[in-house]
Amino acid sequence: MSEKTIRIGTRDSELALWQAHTVQKKLNDLGYSTEIVAVKSTGDIILDKPLYELGITGIFTKTLDIAMLKGEIDIAVHSMKDVPTALPIGIVQAAVLERANTLDILVHKGNLDFLNTNGTIASGSLRRKAQWLNKYPSHTVEDLRGNVNTRMQKLKDNSWNGAIFAAAGLERINLKPDTYMNLDWMVPAPAQGAMLVVAMENDTYTKEALSHLNHKETEICTFIERQFLKTLEGGCTAPIGALAKIEGEKIHFEGVLHSLDGKENYEIKKSCNFDDYTFFGRNCATEILNNGANLLMKKLRETLKVK
């Protein structure tokens, strides 16, 4: 079957490599020839600044985008929540794999008494920080950067009470400890738990190969969530959560936007039919923007210095 070897680009963290090898196996099982090409991203190298201070949208995907545009790789595998809503010209979404666990979890040190008093937890995510402070306003949230292995080690090395992780990432590389708590009240990042594979728009052979990996229900749900994100943010990194779920003939959606300190909160919960999902995410975002969230987004852009 194989006309060429499909070069799979990935970050070189354990989780990113797990994701790339998962795609590789699926393609190999279909008869395609593949090879893994691992590169280090700016987001992995610069660990001393919060993500939003680096001024790059898609910091974990930019290096792979460049490698693809230069013809060094044919496809790239990403955690979909890390991918900007606008892909570079010439690069297209080729497959969304079936979604894993969407939950955020708190990894703690065996004692949850701090939840009822003052505590310190860690997260590099504006969304997680804002939602945590909304629920626990007396707590402190420290910045935590690096791949999941690095963040787990930093949690062990510091006196923090806990740190927030995506359950899917820890489960994929068997790093989920016994001392964790599901944060089922926390609305996840748009597309959390989903893996995205991108390819060059003009690469018909590779796009056809990847089409066999696409999971339609996950594609629909992540499309709605990312449309909600894109309509709200306008290129700004902001504390935005979104989750769409398919139940029977309905798609249920929940979206939230918080201020950085968690004190301001805009949320929406709505459902639609499959016939109406094309602009569903955009319409949900527009509704909360019209209800006052536009003023919060303006403040966030000024605070985060993203124009």
Image: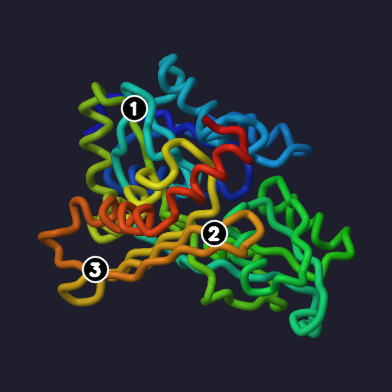
Residue 270 visible? The answer is yes
Instruction: Name the mark on residue 91.
Output: 1
**Residue found at x 19% / y 67%:** 272
Label 1: element kind = strand
Instruction: Name the mark on residue 75.
Output: none
- Depth check, front residue: 303 or 225: 303
47 to 221, vertically: above or below: above
Which residue corresponds to mark 2?
A: 258
Which residue corresponds to mark 3?
A: 251
Which quarter of the picture shows residue 284?
bottom left
Label 3: element kind = strand
**Residue found at x 28% / y 50%:** 282
Residue 223 lies, in percent from the top left, at 30, 51
**Residue found at x 51% / y 51%:** 296
Question: CA gap, disc 3 to disc 1?
Answer: 28 Å
**Residue found at x 28% / y 41%:** 210
Three-letter amino acid code of the residue under disc 1: Ile
Position of 106 with respect to 120 (left or right) is left
- Depth check, front residue: 116 or 287: 287
- Depth check, front residue: 90 or 171: 90
Three-letter amino acid code of the residue under disc 2: His
Indicate which label's residue lies in the foreground, 3 or 1. Answer: 3
Three-letter amino acid code of the residue under disc 3: Ile
How many residues crowd mark 3 within 10 Å: few (<14), some (14–19), many (20+)? many
Q: Which circle's residue, 3 or 1, is located before the other in the chain?
A: 1
How many residues crowd mark 2 within 10 Å: few (<14), some (14–19), many (20+)? many
Residue 79 lies, in percent from the top left, at 48, 48
Q: Which circle's residue, 1 or 2, is located before the other in the chain?
A: 1
Question: CA gap, disc 2 to disc 3?
Answer: 23 Å
- Count of all numbered marks drawn on residues in the image: 3
- Depth check, front residue: 6 or 120: 120
85 to 101, vertically: above or below: above
